[in-house]
């Protein structure tokens, strides 16, 4: 086996080709969502894919150290990392080259991120990512602006019915602090919360005494935001947790003013997966089973308070409705170039014959130019376009739809 | 010195941040040029940034082996490369996943490429690249389509007056073959051609005898295509070089039919920098001193004849005219959200106040919403936008234009 030449079609696990028409769809989704960010005054930055690892892994980047590919820079003999997230790079730009720019600073980005290992449910190791960072402002209004932008961007690409789930990653630690819980007892209770094991949380919290007991009620209160906020209001929380709860209520109110119809859920004691968030964190879900479409929340951008949002175009690609395949107009040899140019200016796709052997349907054309007129081709004998080739390899996310 | 903490603003040589407004301009140029490719029936593919090195360095990729970053895949324990060019990846896709798709196969791509070392005049180690590949067809019409697409894409982003320089990388080797030149004598003549040292070419070619002597005239014939083609027609070339010359004439004729006004030059004996081209090769130049904007030509895509074109968006960014900075409309606290949404739908940029401290001009706004009306702000006291921060670091390609 080891002497066999490697299969040239084989890509490393978690790395894949996006074929027609999916690659064009993804690019169009990204630019449409970036257009929404730009319309709200967010200005695009483009950090490099590679930079020195100490820069990349600073601040919020530290959470991704074990997911970052490293390579040696032959110029400087220093280690570089391939970015696994763009937020730490935007924080670097804000703190250095844009440190004199007025605050709040609104920046946005789109690009690829790479990670060393995929997970079982998300095997991809290269992911497209786009997002916004709102830097230098610590307010519920700012958090609401970032979250609402995510909803608006997804709506702009046809994904309606997005739901927003808010978590308060600092709440559980603050309650455990207030209860004076440390060491093994704290670790055990944190693990039970992490597993959402209500019985175990109740058992351990009761043993721990007063402020920890709120965890039992708050775990049960997870659900629609109004109910969860009512549970938070009703609980006689100590000062730290109370501030966190009041902030959550403000963020929800600011969101309701922006998006009255948005479905908002709140899980006050959830804290998984938000390793660098310092205030509210949020996740955007598509309707039905389309899964997580984006994530964001409050964090420290270097020394500055900030809030941000990342959207996952690969997930949006699965959730967004598909446009009809564009018409393709075959241009026979000797066609009038000005007529063809006029068709393209009108937004139509042309495919020019290069030899007498080229045939309209074989090239995936739905129409042809004949005597200066565009005529629709019959439905019989339609041939598949490029994407209908062999799509068996890993990463063939979508076979192409036959065009006729 | 070695104990100083590294400067967080410092990026590895040849890697840089693109700041506002340049990052948005680059993205808009790329999508506008990709739109031209799509309008001609080229369908987008998106290969991964990383793949196994043996795949990446096959065929035309071999020429870039020493410019390719490598890293170990912890999953497979095999070496991967970070692409230094996208063409070999598109060739792989055409030969594997799209091998059953009809020919000619028209594909396009846009993305980043990385290289181990920059050069003195082009220090960048990450470059945006976009292009087309026209696979499975060997004709002058195909070469002309690819080259003309480059001109049309550059025109679409406002770069008029593009000139096309055609070279015939196979011509000099064919003449040296016909002259039976080998070993040191051949290497010396090739070097003189490479340096365009006419006196040395003449001296060595005369010593070598008949077919080599054509090199003297062909070196002198470089210039406007009509003159160079006339020199090729006049020379009694042996069979191999004659075929190459006739093909060049066909490509020029096919280009003239598409773009009658295009300035075309032809350098029959130039062969630098086109290491994998098997037929005509071409370079697109912007007007004035804007330099090389793209490059392409005929090559083998695996086992198939192909022609392709790459454009360099970073060069296009320097050559393209700048649009006026967009108006930014400040939305005071308590503004009517529906009015603001209407402004954005009409293509305008809004910037919402998040606190009473936010001030329109400090946020780079040119206009403000007041009582439901958009009013222009006075010119005094304009504050710089984000890009006017510290742009001293390497890679600050453009300071932002102040908006007022």
Image (cartoon, coloured by chain):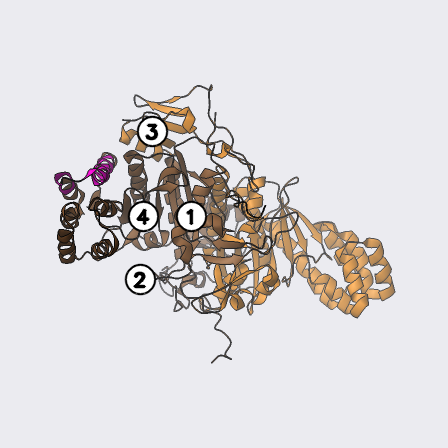
Chain colours: A brown, B orange
B262, above or below A18, in the image: above
Taking B285 as reference, is B193 above or below it?
below
Determine which residue is flagged by label 4.
A295
Magenta span of residues: A231-255
Check the residue under mark 3 and report the chain it is in.
B
Q: Residue A86 has which mark?
A: 1
Labels 2 and 1 within one chain: yes
Q: Position of residue A252 (x, y in %)?
A: 22, 38
* Disc 2 to disc 1: CB gap under 8 Å: no
- Pointer 4 indicates a residue of which chain? A
For marks 2 and 4 on the same chain, the one whose residue lies earlier in the sequence: 2
Give the residue at mark 2.
A121
Chain hosting mark 2:
A
Label 2 neighbour load within 10 Å: few <14, some 14-19, many 20+:
few
Mark identifier at residue B353: 3
Residue at 46% x, 49% y is A56
Element marked by disc 2: loop
Q: Respond whether the residues carrying marks 1 and 3 are from the same subunit.
A: no
Q: Residues within 10 Å of mark 1 (few under 14, many from 20)?
A: many
Q: Residues under labels 3 and 2: Cα distance? A: 40 Å
Using the image, name the chain to which the residue with label 1 belongs: A
């Amino acid at each position: 086996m080891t002497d066999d030449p490697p299969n040239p079609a084989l890509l490393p696990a978690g790395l894949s080709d996006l074929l027609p028409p999916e690659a064009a769809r993804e690019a169009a989704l990204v630019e449409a969502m970036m257009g929404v960010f730009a319309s709200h005054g967010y200005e695009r930055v483009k950090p490099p894919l590679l930079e020195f690892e100490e820069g990349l892994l600073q601040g919020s980047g530290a959470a991704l150290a074990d997911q970052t590919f490293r390579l040696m820079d032959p110029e400087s003999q220093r280690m570089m990392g391939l970015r696994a997230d763009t937020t730490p790079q935007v924080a670097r730009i804000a703190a250095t080259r844009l440190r004199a720019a007025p605050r709040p600073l609104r920046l946005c980005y789109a690009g690829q991120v790479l990670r060393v290992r995929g997970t079982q449910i998300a095997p991809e190791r290269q992911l497209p990512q786009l997002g916004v960072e709102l830097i230098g402002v610590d307010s519920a209004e700012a958090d609401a602006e970032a979250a609402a932008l995510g909803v608006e961007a997804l709506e702009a690409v046809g994904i309606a019915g997005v739901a927003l789930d808010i978590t308060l990653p600092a709440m559980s630690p603050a309650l455990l602090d207030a209860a004076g819980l440390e060491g093994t007892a704290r670790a055990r209770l944190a693990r039970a919360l992490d597993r959402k094991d209500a019985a175990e949380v109740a058992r351990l919290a009761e043993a721990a005494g007063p402020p920890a007991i709120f965890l039992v009620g708050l775990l049960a209160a997870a659900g629609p935001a109004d109910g969860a906020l009512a549970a938070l209001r009703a609980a006689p929380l100590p000062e730290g947790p109370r501030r966190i709860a009041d902030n959550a209520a403000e963020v929800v109110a600011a969101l309701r003013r922006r998006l009255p119809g948005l479905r908002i859920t709140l899980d006050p004691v959830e804290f998984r997966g938000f390793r660098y968030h310092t205030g509210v964190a949020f996740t955007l879900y598509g309707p039905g089973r389309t899964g997580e479409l984006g994530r964001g929340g409050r964090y420290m951008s270097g020394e500055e308070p900030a809030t941000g949002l990342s959207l996952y175009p690969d997930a949006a690609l699965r959730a967004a409705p598909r446009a009809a395949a564009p018409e393709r107009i075959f241009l026979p040899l000797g066609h009038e170039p000005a007529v063809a140019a006029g068709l393209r200016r009108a937004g139509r796709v042309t495919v020019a014959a290069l030899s007498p052997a080229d045939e309209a349907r074989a090239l995936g054309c739905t129409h042809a130019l004949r005597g200066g007129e565009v005529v629709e081709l019959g439905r019989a004998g339609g041939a598949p376009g490029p994407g209908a080739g062999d799509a068996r390899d890993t990463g063939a996310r979508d076979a192409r739809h036959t065009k006729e």
